[in-house]
Amino acid sequence: MNILVVSSSGRTKGNSDLLCDELIRGAKEKGNIVSKVSLHQLNIHPCKGCDYCQEHDGCIQDDDMKDLSKVIQNTDVLVMATPVYFYNLSSSLKLLIDRTYAFYKKKHFKKTILIATSADPSPEAMKTTISGYESYLSCLDGVENLGMILAAGVEKMGDVLGHSAFKQAYELGKSLQ
């Protein structure tokens, strides 16, 4: 299985990034082909809403989304990872989601996973993030949600290492075949 893990954390080895790595470890143990990209290392512009992409093949903008969109379209499983900022998806993940407008009615991934981390220990802290993720999936035909790895109450870098979500990430990765 071809898996793309998209990390929207601005912190390398931050909590959501560590969960990505643990999911990847489990997935690779089962022989999956796994790639990881960090959105903060890419130059992706906001969607202009011009609809050029609906009449042509691809977006009119010349940025890193041009190559990334091809990878996303040809992956089996898209893993989206986000730290929760102000009770919502990170801005870089939302930017990516908006830019998938260029191909959401065309060829795209068929399975997805959400990884989200929050400093706030309340499960309610993730409510808007989950809603945004599920609303996005409702726009896509035939996409199966394979699960959500949610780690609330992980504020400092590395806090997630002792959280139950850490094992869950590995186990979910191992289940991908």
Image (cartoon, rainbow, N blue to C red):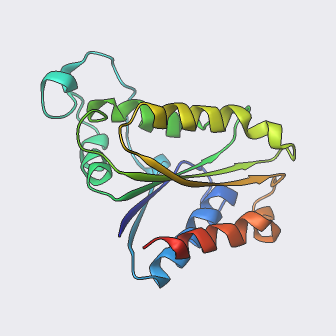
Identity of the residue drawn at 54% across and 48% down = 8
**Place of residue 101 in the rendered image (x, y in percent of width and height, measured from the top left):** 33, 30
- How many marks do you count on the picture? 0
State the image quarter where residue 47 is shown: top left
Residue 128 versus residue 72 in the image, above or below: above
Residue 114 versus residue 5 in the image, above or below: above
Q: Is residue 176 left or right of residue 13?
A: left
Residue that extends furthest to the left in the rendered view of this protein: 56
Residue that extends furthest to the right in the rendered view of this protein: 121
Residue 108 versus residue 129 in the image, above or below: below
Instruction: Specify the quadrant that holds the C terminus.
Output: bottom left
Q: Is residue 95 visible?
A: no
**Place of residue 149 in the rendered image (x, y in percent of width and height, measured from the top left):** 66, 56
**Place of residue 46 in the rendered image (x, y in percent of width and height, measured from the top left):** 40, 27
Identity of the residue drawn at 63% across and 32% down = 131
Residue in front for this viewpoint, 42 or 28: 28
Identity of the residue drawn at 76% across and 70% down = 161
Residue in front for this viewpoint, 147 or 72: 147
Identity of the residue drawn at 65% across and 36% down = 129
State the image quarter where residue 37 is shown: bottom left
Instruction: Specify the quadrant that holds the N terminus.
Output: bottom left
**Place of residue 143 in the rendered image (x, y in percent of width and height, measured from the top left):** 41, 46
Q: Is residue 1 left or right of residue 145?
A: left
